[in-house]
Amino acid sequence: MFDRLWEEDPVMKNWRQGGVEEGEIKRARWDVLRIVQMRFPGILQQVQERVELVSDLSQLGELFDQFVVASDEAAALAALDRPVEP
């Protein structure tokens, strides 16, 4: 009975999808912060404050990519200069 409600009810579907998306966003934020912690611990606090404002998965993915290839802290900080799309 509850399985059917879980699968067919539009409110339940929306709630479930929202939970999945929020989990993906949290994981993407964690990934960004982890790479910064490993490579540029001196700017971790700045990055954390900025990343908490981002709720777009593609933007978080772009930040991750930029931190992976950044040659130094200055290049990593330059990635933060782009506008945030909440």
Image: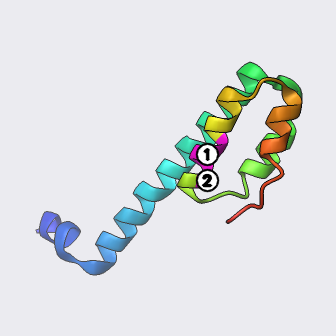
**Residue furthest to the bottom:** 10
The tally of labels here is 2
Give above or below for 41 relative to 7: above
Left or right relative to 54: residue 74: right
Q: From this viewpoint, is residue 46 visible?
A: yes
Q: Give the range drawn in magenta.
A: 59-63
Q: Residue at left 54%, top 53%?
A: 58
Q: In which quarter of the image is residue 29?
A: top right
- Specify the quadrant of the image occupied by residue 9: bottom left
Residue displayed at 70% across by 33% down: 67
Residue at 86 percent of width and 42 percent of height:
46
* Residue at horizontal 18 percent and vertical 67 percent from the top: 7
Contact, CB < 8 Å: mark 1 with mark 2?
yes
Can you identify the residue that label 1 sits on?
62
Asked if residue 43 can be seen in this view, the reply is no
The x, y position of residue 16, in whole percent, is 35, 63
What residue is disc 2 on? Answer: 59
Identify which amino acid the numbered label 2 is placed on.
Gln
Q: Position of residue 17 (x, y in %)?
A: 37, 64
**Residue toward you, 1 or 16:** 16
Say what secondary structure mark 1 lies in. helix
CA separation in Å, label 1 and label 2: 5 Å
